[in-house]
Image (spheres, rainbow, N blue to C red):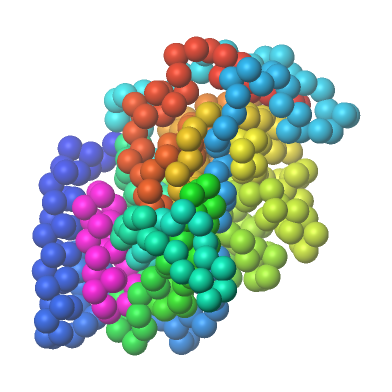
Amino acid sequence: MSEEGEGVDDWDETVAEWGREVDEWEGDVRERTGDIRERAGGVRGDGGDRAGPSARDAVDGDTDADDSNPAVDADPAVDADPAVDSDPAVDSDPAVDSDPDLPPDDADRVPKVVAAGHINWDVTIHVDSLPEPDGETRIDRLEQSGGGSAANVAVGLVDLGGQSVVYGSVGGDESGALALRELASAGVDPGQVLVDADEPTSVKYVIVDGGGELLMLANDGANESFSAAGLDRDTLAAADHLHLTGQQPETAAALATAAAEAGATRSFDPGRRVADREFDAALHASDVLFVNDREADALAAATDVDPWEPDDRVVAIKLGDEGATVRTPHGSVSHPGFDADPVDTTGAGDAFAAGFLAAALREPEITGDGFSHDPRDYQVPILVGNACGAVATESVTARTDLSWDRVRETMGESPETDLLIEVRT
């Protein structure tokens, strides 16, 4: 892995260069001149890197719109025992840090993350209510933005002071150019992205009703055209961490294995199709799993991995309006979340993962030798994750501007929200 803080000074110039190169690529695509596979800021355009044909599975593995509000509506007057962990045989640990420190403002430790998985272009449509069959409703607001679970986490990590490379695939069309342009503008390195000229970019239509609930329509597109063989091994070797999201199971397994060999820690957020795809190898190769409560139940029923009682990994379970719980082999830590006024829950689960990783990867005692199994180490990551999830629900589209200032603002000045943490060992 690379030395901590390396390359931070010239980061802004690097991002600016990506933006200029993506602009050039976008112009080439629109004019349809030259080879559609030419590189955009180093974007991979060699279809020969693909392992077999383009993705044929439905683009449902994303978590960018799957975790409905992972960190909202927590009443500050809630009981200090939110009863998230209901195991009566587990003793409550009173050693809760009532004033946890958020990561420092300096850049002494800048986590470098490769986020691999889906890259979408999202069209978000807000309506007061969904129409009945043969009915019609008025569009109150329409927004277009980048999306996809891997891309969302990559952007969130950069917002929180990290460095990230996104690895996935887009089509050789205008939607793909827009997705890459937005990633580069956000400070994410898109240089490993495969451009598949034979498939369209996956476009996800997200319909949000007046209550913030979601309905999604999506095409398969080029979302899973990439393979593990296409990721530059030097890029992976320079990373501290690999974050996997929904993708072909064999790709996820191979990437996780390669990351382990390179000495990088691994996390996996498989999404709603976790029980329908053969993710066993990737699950077992991951240090941290991100799932919601429905996915946790599905995993426990369909595999030998029980997220509620893990025996060899850390599992962060997003619990909707009840916040989140982090389960480890040595106990758990839970927090009921933060109060929010949700307008769009798209991407809230990805924001939680970005916040959790941004906090955990900065702490050597958590990730110095794999991920710690001491639940007390996750008091700050769960707070930051819940705060980021709450921030995401108050923004339209799957992308939101995360920052440590917004995290602190969401947490508030009172230590009461911190005291709602429950640690069990």
Counting from the top left corner in percent of width and height, residue 83 is at 76, 29
Q: Is residue 122 above or below residue 211?
A: below
- Does 414 appear in magenta? no
Viewer-closest of 350 and 306 = 350
Q: Quadrant of residue 50?
A: bottom left
Question: Is any atom of residue 375 visible in this view?
Answer: no
**Rendered residue at 64%/58% (across/down):** 283
**Rendered residue at 70%/53% (across/down):** 294
Instruction: Check the picture and name the quadrant holding the C terminus.
Output: top right
Counting from the top left corner in percent of width and height, residue 41 is at 19, 64
Which residue lies most toward the right here? 89
> In the drawing, does residue 33 fall left or right of residue 398?
left
> In the drawing, does residue 238 fall left or right of residue 267?
left
Q: Is residue 255 above or below residue 347?
A: below
Give the mark count.
0
**Rendered residue at 40%/77% (across/down):** 222
Counting from the top left corner in percent of width and height, residue 237 is at 39, 55
Viewer-closest of 302 and 420 = 420
Q: Is residue 223 above or below residue 87?
A: below
Which residue lies most toward the front here? 135
Q: Which residues are magenta?
A: 170-194
Counting from the top left corner in percent of width and height, residue 297 is at 75, 53
> In the drawing, does residue 194 fall left or right of residue 259?
left
**Rendered residue at 31%/24% (across/down):** 105
- Does 188 appear in magenta? yes
Viewer-closest of 332 and 1 = 332
Question: Is any atom of residue 332 visible in this view?
Answer: yes
Viewer-closest of 367 and 324 = 324
